[in-house]
Amino acid sequence: MTDVTEAPTQAAAASTVSTMPLGKALTAGLRRALAENDRVLLMGEDIGPLGGVFRITEGLQAEFGPQRVIDTPLAESGIIGTAIGLAMGGFRPVCEIQFDGFVYPGFDQITSQLAKITNRHEGALRMPVVIRIPYGGHIGAIEHHQESPETYFTHTPGLRVVSPSTANDAYWMIQEAIASTDPVIFLEPKSKYWQKGEVDTSAPALPLHASRVVRRGTDVTLVGHGAMVTTLLQAAALAESEGTSCEVVDLRSLSPVDYGPILDSVRRTGRMVYAQESPQFTSLGSEIAATVMERAFYALEAPVLRVSGFDAPFPPAKLEGLYLPDPDRILEAVDRTMAY
Amino acid sequence: MTDVTEAPTQAAAASTVSTMPLGKALTAGLRRALAENDRVLLMGEDIGPLGGVFRITEGLQAEFGPQRVIDTPLAESGIIGTAIGLAMGGFRPVCEIQFDGFVYPGFDQITSQLAKITNRHEGALRMPVVIRIPYGGHIGAIEHHQESPETYFTHTPGLRVVSPSTANDAYWMIQEAIASTDPVIFLEPKSKYWQKGEVDTSAPALPLHASRVVRRGTDVTLVGHGAMVTTLLQAAALAESEGTSCEVVDLRSLSPVDYGPILDSVRRTGRMVYAQESPQFTSLGSEIAATVMERAFYALEAPVLRVSGFDAPFPPAKLEGLYLPDPDRILEAVDRTMAY
Amino acid sequence: MTPLDSPARTDGSTRRDAPAFSEAPGLVRILGADGAIAPTASAEPYLAVIDALADAQLEEFYRDMVVIRAFDREATNLQRQGQLALWPPSFGQEAAQVGSARAARTQDHLFPSYREHVVCRIRGVDPLDIIRVMRGVTHGGWNPYDPKNGNTHIYTLVLGAQTLHATGVGMGLVFDGKSGTGDADRDEAVLVYYGDGASSQGDVHESMVFAASFRTPEVFFLQNNQWAISVPVATQSRTPLVRRGEGYGIPSVQVDGNDVLASYAVSRVALDEARAGGGPRAIEALTYRMGAHTTSDDPTKYRTSSEEESWARRDPIARMRTYLEGRGAAASFFADVEAEAHAVAEDTRERTMALGGIDTSVMFDHVYSEQHPLIDEERRWLADYETSFEGDAR
Amino acid sequence: MTPLDSPARTDGSTRRDAPAFSEAPGLVRILGADGAIAPTASAEPYLAVIDALADAQLEEFYRDMVVIRAFDREATNLQRQGQLALWPPSFGQEAAQVGSARAARTQDHLFPSYREHVVCRIRGVDPLDIIRVMRGVTHGGWNPYDPKNGNTHIYTLVLGAQTLHATGVGMGLVFDGKSGTGDADRDEAVLVYYGDGASSQGDVHESMVFAASFRTPEVFFLQNNQWAISVPVATQSRTPLVRRGEGYGIPSVQVDGNDVLASYAVSRVALDEARAGGGPRAIEALTYRMGAHTTSDDPTKYRTSSEEESWARRDPIARMRTYLEGRGAAASFFADVEAEAHAVAEDTRERTMALGGIDTSVMFDHVYSEQHPLIDEERRWLADYETSFEGDAR
Ligand SMILES: Cc1ncc(C[n+]2csc(CCOP(=O)(O)OP(=O)(O)O)c2C)c(N)n1
Ligand SMILES: Cc1ncc(C[n+]2csc(CCOP(=O)(O)OP(=O)(O)O)c2C)c(N)n1
Ligand SMILES: [Mg+2]
Ligand SMILES: [Mg+2]
């Protein structure tokens, strides 16, 4: 687990809880990070006067100026590569990639440079760079705008990968990611930007790399991250009405994975279903299934089942409902695992 | 399985078997593909007069001319992107990437373009492009020259991914890959370029996407691809001397995976170890472990164990012996699985 | 801190004017903003190309522009009414697009970016196929090599990626001897579109490197519409973008992209030079995106209405209309064009509303062109799963 | 098929000469190939910079070149003897490298590519750290920000990637107000090296786009050594590469890279202009890789000995020696330099042979700078596994 003492922790007076959409919680988290450390800067396409296509940086350039919130030329490799140079110069850059499908032109700088520079320098240089990527489906958009590229990053040693599913986590995790001295791929479940939740600005609930049980249950363990957490909770509610009790774990950290709560749960339930939007073949879900089966072999009554996007490119928007795991597909897997 | 009738199959007279190194078998396969179809062309850095840094294209430019064997400018995205255009124009380009670690600048063209163009066009355009990548360790080289990037490709729908481990497979699989109307990532185990084997030029032994049992055994199933096949066979021989009988399966095709022979074997042995050079976290090995456990759950006496490169960047060459799975590490896993 | 003079950085926190119409010496303009023939010095060599045009052709340019603007407006409305996921308007860029597309010959290969609706239409693509993409029922829309689509490639949404595909096609033309034979009616060329924002992508660079190296018969057509969503062109380049091509030894010309005659002439000459074996050419067309970036965009956040108004005065359609009127085009001609534009818009609306759903098979059928066991399995699983709901309330 | 005139394609099947020394109008040369001062017209503005140099400085340039050549030769030998995995010789490129590196000021930030051994040495890096990289006992070699290493970054093996890091450092200097204050002794600048082959990479383009946009205090130093392994520079560009920078509005100059005086002068002026707030500058240094690409390479496969000989006549060291002799440098000076070169080579050999192994911990300790459970687990597993062999025959 990351040492979170670097994250802001001062207790605020009176009520520190308010309700806001996940996207605005991110804005608030970014604002606080900018205010508390003047080496933090934001960079990306259209994040200045426009506030980003999702308005996550809205108002921040006006507040912190164009040297802290920077509209870059339109080039992802350039954004990541210069962020690396800025980090060499002591800055803590937070890069915005406009949509999941546009991160690949920057892939070499992420994979061969950002992820490996600390290692290459044997610790002499650090890379406190955050790459924010709105990801996932459910918004009915055109090609390249609904993908889930997490596996490309989780498979890359040197990167940390996280994804918040609630407003409170969004607020805290973005600050913790910025405070981390390692590069963090910060995946924002874009379909949940408008989902409201309570944010407590007094202290983070959990460290950045902890997973969390978000619903207790006894028959099957459901695990997922980002937008899938909502889907899993819906499935759990339906399952309950059909007599099956599901525990739900929000992964929060995709790399490293905090296996503690998952294994603890699986040892109690003996059954597990993993849900993700990304294609299944050689995915994060494959890893978690393989590892849970390896570590809880005798506890399992059934193989860990995965419910994923299909092993096809994300389809045209009108088919996304078919492509993306929904509560029914998760229940189908729950039924299958219960049948063992 | 791919329809292999497109691959050259004419019977040759007299002996069609000769012994040659894997690298020279590739040269011979490329030569035959160039000779039999004048839409085939090779392109890459230094593949002309130099014959490539591994001399795989040696002599081919002299034989087929500089419009069939093309030295390109030094730019991987350019190589893949123009190969796509050439395929649109009816060519069948075979691109050489000089080393595994230099494929990432071309990642966007591979992932968002090459892999998806057929799907995007609903079948109206085809992308018979082969990307040859010498991969893996064991050659004591400097950074970026010993990586195993297969998972980035196997996780990408639309790509086929294969890797030969013998000279005969090298000769045939490169021709089958070129004959495929889909893009194929062709991973060449560079440390085996000099390993000799018999090549039978009369007919391919197996279709491109078939896996193959290369050693029979009864206690544990060992699975891997490329250079790992040699290591697995060495481990199997050692295990035999210690009283454990190992079956060895050469994956050959990394995507799709031909699970038939693997599951068949595991149903008999009840135990399996997967070996790969790449980092383990969210890797091809994770997929195969998860799927085998899912499909052969009741047949397994032990979890599928994985022996992989560590989840660290490929280390400086002097440490590669520690990083790469060797027969001992495979035996350690065999022992562990036998202990269940 | 250093005082910064970059528009990218100092004007960042408020709305800002794009730098004045960034004309370089050598700009080619034939038709003035007032619709009168007023060639710049650099336009002289191109005048003969325009003189050779028949009235019918000039009228066709106008018709193209008016019709597509009506289509574009209708598509924008359809998006507002929830019929489309998104619409990227071509409003304001009609002259650059019509001039270049009309300059291409039948045998040429065109690679649009994602806003070149009239380019597609001119080449024979049914604009409804573009609508289908933006409605979310297909990723592609059409088959570039179906003869009815005039070798026009589909939109590419990853900015700049298509420039490499275009160059690859051009390399193939060289290898196949399909250009440079001296027969302009048969020699093939490639025309590729991209924007001022896209020009910063590494792929555009590599495309120019390969094009220059292999001497592809190719024209790089950059529509500098002053903005990449909210980012002014000055952030991408502090020098006119036309100079970029020269860095590769690619002969380059800057044209007034709101002048359909100049756009046509420079494109025609560049394409013919390229097809004749002269190697690649580059064109920077200065124009303006008069509408929003897409229907999701709000330009009031980043640019001023005075800037928009100044460009409205250079509207490419008004300019051409004045010119044609000056040449004595009949009132009936303009009425006829209006009627056609109206009809096309109506037709677009009707056919959009009539668009059916999308077949599930689209998800699996073309991931690979050859059989694939994993896809087969997933297709089968989904079919069984769907069947399991038949007669089910859930 | 079209007859192709590209050297990339027509000369492909046999060995070929690189195109003649691709001088563009404007080439800056001060010292002729015969070692006499013979400035080109474009060199005039730079002569004052050279006039200001003391004898000691001129002799230092010479010493740098001779010493590194001896080191480079020794390293090549060490590779042949199995001590190193690989060695990329700098043989022939000493003047371009010494001139530019000596032009940098203490506070500047240098980004080599992977062949700039003398640049590293001049800045204070122990050349044995380069040897360690090529021996396979470290990926990096040194800490760029350890004061003894003079802000010199480690080698980057993915071609062109370092140009973006350099530009990022330059952006940081702008944001921090560490350049452009007018104090040349304190204002910081960035100097980044790359090759003719690397110039084709998208990253180099994006780097120039960002540099121009943010007006970084940065000098792009391109060593055009005529070859990218076996591929001649004509495949990367048909026009002098110096023009590339101009496409971004970056003032650019071509220099005779085998003339250490000219290399120094243009670099000095460019760096000082950049540090003063003038924005980025680009330099193309024409030079020649007189040896193999690396010890794995065989240049006889792709280039002719007549070409090699013609460049041998322009050897940067011989040229400078003649010049110094002409100025009356003492024979003892040359003897002294030879002795130092010999000593450095000896020292290199001895210290290389004495290099220890590599600690296993290097594999895990720096993957992350903060604690990481998976790494901890694997480190533990490996330690246990290794322990299990203790006292074991296996
Ligand atoms: C590689 C990539 N990055 C980001 C985007 C998101 N995006 C879509 S259009 C656009 C602006 C494009 O500007 P320009 O190239 O000038 O074309 P215009 O929209 O003005 O026609 C951006 C940033 C993208 N499509 N592709
Ligand atoms: C992205 C990338 N592709 C390929 C390579 C393999 N490679 C190493 S050096 C080299 C040639 C470099 O030529 P140039 O840039 O001219 O530098 P020079 O070797 O002449 O100093 C190549 C192709 C690499 N290191 N990085
Ligand atoms: Mg634009
Ligand atoms: Mg070179």
Image (cartoon, coloured by chain):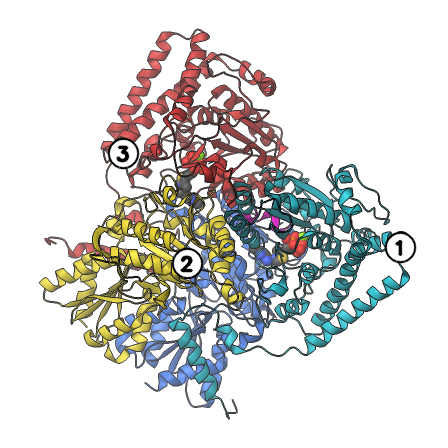
Chain colours: A blue, B yellow, C cyan, D red
Q: Callout 3, which amino acid?
A: Gln
Residue depth check, mark 2 versus mark 3: number of the one nearer the observer: 3
Same chain check for tags 3 and 1: no
Residue span colored magenta? C196-204
Tell me whether circle 2 and circle 3 mark residues in contact (CB < 8 Å).
Answer: no
Quick one: C180 or D267, which is closer to the camera?
C180
Binning the other alpha carbons within 10 Å of mark 3 as few (below 14), some (14 to 19) or many (20 upward) gives: many
Measure how far apart labels 1 and 2 are at the Cα level.
73 Å
Residue wearing tag 3: D79
Q: Callout 1, which amino acid?
A: Glu
Disc 2 on helix, strand or loop? loop
Same chain check for tags 1 and 2: no
Instruction: Name the spot of residue B11 as percent of width and height, x first.
Output: 27, 61
Residue wearing tag 2: A2
Residue wearing tag 1: C325
Q: Callout 2, which amino acid?
A: Thr
Quadrant of image for the N terminus of chain C: top right
Instruction: Name the spot of residue D252 as percent of width and height, x first.
Output: 59, 31
Q: Main secondary structure of the magenta part?
A: helix
